[in-house]
Amino acid sequence: MAGRAWTRNPRRWQVAPLYGGADDLARRLRTAPLVAQVLHNRGLDDSDEARAFLQPKLTDLHDPLELPGCRAAARRIARAVQQKEPIAVYGDYDVDGMTAIAILHACLKLVGCPVKAYVPHRLEEGYGVNAEALRSLIADGARLIITVDCGIGAADVFAEVGGGADIIVTDHHAPSKRLPDASAVVHPLLEEGGRAYPNPNLCGAGVAFKLAWQVARELVGETRVDETMREFLLEATCLAALGTIADVVPLTGENRVLATFGLRGLPAVKHVGLRALLESAKLAESSLDAYHIGFVLAPRLNAAGRMGHAAQAVELLTTSDAARAKEIAAWLAARNAERQKVERAIAAEACDMVVEAGLDGDGSRAIVLSNENWHGGVIGIVASRLVDQFSRPAILIARNGDGLGQGSGRSIPGFDMAAALAACDEHLLSHGGHAMAGGLKIQPENISAFSEAFGVYASENITPEQLIPALRIDAETTLPALGYNVVDLLGRMAPFGAGNPRPVIALRGCKLACPPKRMGRNGQTVSLLLSQNGSAMRAVGFGMGDLADHLPGQETLDIAAEPMLNTFNGRTNVELRLRDVVW
């Protein structure tokens, strides 16, 4: 949190039980017992499933025909292509929506179909499909409208608009009881022919990728695609990986396949917009992992919608003009820098408000703050920061252009944000979301009553234990056991993210081999040299610089950390990234 020093907050270490079959699984997989323990923690005890996880293949992707609605949608799109019907692709303004638009847009352009991309304005139009935009697209000539990463809950909107164009809905959010009346609804949570799709966690870009794959089949008239479409689909995994990782869906099963091959392909990608984005971020030709997408590339794309209109980010991902792509990428970099500055200012102000109001005390179980000067495009990010800092669900409310309060909330495990908002429905104009995040609109005069009602609901539904954040630890081990080969094998479990977090290990009874040092800008990073049983290893704690003032004189430390390989000046060593320190 900007402007705040590191503090020693209690955390509940949840160490996974020792897996008795680790040695046997490790022998069958030809890996280390520690890796086998981590695989077991991820539910991968079967050696074939574990091997598929460690060695993902494109052939592990499920057939698009297994995805409910995909066949019908692809046939309607193929007919539109053959008859040169104008198509509009309507997507969400986040990275998942943008990349989903880009995949279908590129597929349709490749086969010569007239296609237009549309993305709503975050603050002026809000999330999802709106009737005015649909009417505008139809008036502009669209005869088929395909939604991506949205639309499953828009049955009333489609009914209001009526005819004028056929509708295909592709989405991955929880379906409503009433499905849209459309030519096809493509959704991984629906069933078709009594069968469920094997991967219910497919993101919007993943759904678009599967639909593009099946469209290519329909146009070729075979179960296989031609070489041109094959090359397109291979490169489209880069866009699908962006959407998959940015949308924080579990990186398991075919999501892991898309993320893995997309990350591998990004350094040499030919896609004009992606190349410009990588070059702007100084990542061209670099080896990339999920961190680069989640914390470098995705924020740049999202900055367009947060600080203005996502249309320019969509243009970046759909243009074939290299000069224009370079121009937009530079603009996105500037908007992201602006977003970071605004975010830091709001975060510092919100943090001070929490402390001044005593919302971090024992008598408070939730945080609700409002300010008419806050930027509605970044309050969700700041809410996440408040949750990290204070271990309480947090809602921030800003005023948008029409004078209404627009709120964004983030939750803690075990507290259902969507249910909490529903319980306070009488004070809200609208609300939505899921267990861990939600959004709302509210009349400014109702904010105080809502804040009180939300606080009461939180007090009744959050236990004191839930306010102590849990740290899940995969195994306890020792410094001598963390050799280069073992840590290299752990690294091969990447890409890491939701459903497959980077392994965290516990080391008990470590000693400081020398005094701790501050590093980095303003000394916000701490560097430790730990020793145990004759081995020594460096540990780094980002944002934990003040540990350097607390640790001198401590005889032993218990460490929770992520083991990693760090290359510096041509040398690669095992290093620990600190998650928690107890003494």
Image (cartoon, rainbow, N blue to C red):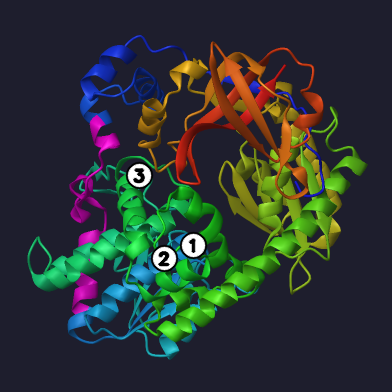
Image check: 113 left or right of 279? Answer: left
Q: Nearer the viewer, residue 446 or 219?
A: 219
Q: Nearer the viewer, mark 1 or mark 3?
A: 1
Q: Report which quarter residue 172 is drawn in.
A: bottom left
Specify the amino acid type for callout 3.
Pro
Q: Are marks 2 and 1 in contact (CB under 8 Å)?
A: yes
Residue 72 visible (yes or no): no
Q: Which residues are magenta?
A: 51-79
Give the main secondary structure, helix, strand or loop, of the magenta stretch: helix
Residue at 38% across / 90% down in the picture?
141
Specify the amino acid type for callout 2.
Thr
Q: Position of residue 582 (x, y in %)?
A: 69, 19
Q: Are marks 3 and 2 in contact (CB under 8 Å)?
A: no
Q: Nearer the viewer, residue 147 or 266?
A: 266
Specify the amino acid type for callout 1.
Val
Residue neighbourhood size for the residue with mark 2, other residues' Cα within 10 Å, grouped as few (<14), some (14–19), many (≥20): many
Q: Which mark is residue 99?
A: 2
Q: Position of residue 126 (x, y in %)?
A: 60, 68
Image check: 326 left or right of 197? Answer: right
Q: Which mark is residue 95?
A: 1
Q: Position of residue 454 (x, y in %)?
A: 76, 42
Q: Of the residues under marks 3 and 2, which one precedes in the sequence?
A: 2
Q: Quadrant of the C terminus?
A: top right
Residue at 34% across / 45% down in the picture?
256
Q: Which residue is mark 3?
A: 200
Residue 213 visible (yes or no): yes
Q: Report which quarter residue 576 is drawn in.
A: top right
